[in-house]
Image (cartoon, helix red, strand yellow):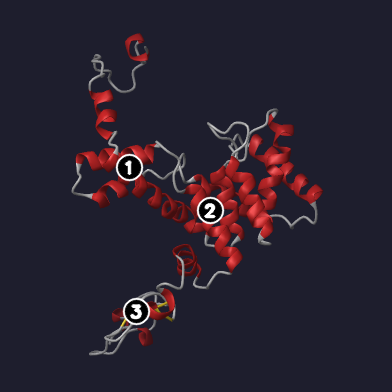
Amino acid sequence: MTESDVPESGTQSDVPESGTQRDYPTALGASSREAITLLGQDLAEDVMGQVGFGELAFWLAAQRRPTAGETRVFEAVLAALADHGFTPTAIVTRLTYLSAPDSVQGALAAGLLGGGSRFLGVTEDCGRFLNEVLREHPLPDDDAGWDALALETVRARREQRKLIPGLGHHVHKDGDPRTLRLFQIATEEGLYGPHLSLFAAIGRVHPQVLGRTLPLNGAGVCGAALADLGLPLELLRAFALLARTAGLIGQLAEELRHPVANDIFLSVDLNNRSIAPEPYGEPRSAAHRS
């Protein structure tokens, strides 16, 4: 073997000898002729009927079995994010199923692909934002310290002309009911950590900077709670999508019994208004603005 045969990222000892087969280590699922193991457990005997789906989802991501309290907080987050009615993700799922009823997976995928910065993605955005602040500052010892850190954080965001993830809601302008409930559950389970503490402090102090009071929204508090559970920040949106998958299945189940997708489609298709072409880059005409 010559030097050119060795991959740049490894050494000669990393390359299997001729006739040998490289293995691919995993702590997740593995099968033999006799059994299936998952996370080191016998799937049939130790997991099926013994471990709830929420607990298993946490276990798969963290590769450690959650405590009962961690499972309760995690499942509360999943419940909070499962379904919000006729959001764009729900509508596109129903419309895709109308167009391709032979592709349930396509309808679900269409809805999940809409999970971004405006819907669902706030969970990740808020968790990452809070974590970045906490990494740069010592943790306060009391509410006054948290308020001081939150005030500094809100002022910095205002100076940067950046929004604060998780602050504000287009419907629950007087308070998102999910937020206080998740604070309560985390407190009861002894899992009210620094991310939730900073998020709550932002809720208390932001009117001093913004001049108005905005609610802490449910997606944001879910991100803070997941971060306090020690779950990977890179996967916070994935947990929101996991929750929304259940909601989209519910949307499809209701669409089967009480279809509305065709009405949504026709309400647009039968009420379109023909206008003249408008080359991109030119000012909008009065006809287009009306």
Q: Along the horizontal axis of the image, is 121 left or right of 284?
A: right
Within 10 angstroms of label 1, few (less than 14), some, or many (20 or more) residues? few
Q: Quadrant of residue 176?
A: top right
Q: What secondary structure is found at the residue carrying circle 3?
A: strand
Q: Which residue is mark 1?
A: 254
Q: Which residue is mark 3?
A: 30
Whichever of callouts 2 and 1 sits on the residue coming sooner in the sequence is 2
User: Nearer the viewer's eye, disc 3 or disc 2?
Assistant: 2
Tell me residue 251's x, y (percent). 35, 43
Tell me residue 211's x, y (percent). 70, 28
| Three-letter residue code for mark 3 | Ala
Q: Residue at x 80, y 53 (%)?
A: 142
Q: Is residue 25 visible?
A: no
Q: Of residues 18 and 190, which is closer to you in this image?
A: 190
Whichever of callouts 3 and 2 sits on the residue coming sooner in the sequence is 3
Query: Which labelled disc corresponds to residue 114?
Result: none
| Three-letter residue code for mark 1 | Glu
* Alpha carbon distance from label 3 to label 2: 29 Å
Whichever of callouts 3 and 1 sits on the residue coming sooner in the sequence is 3
Q: Of residues 136 and 24, which is closer to you in this image?
A: 24
Q: Quadrant of residue 186?
A: bottom right
Q: Residue at x 68, y 58 (%)?
A: 188
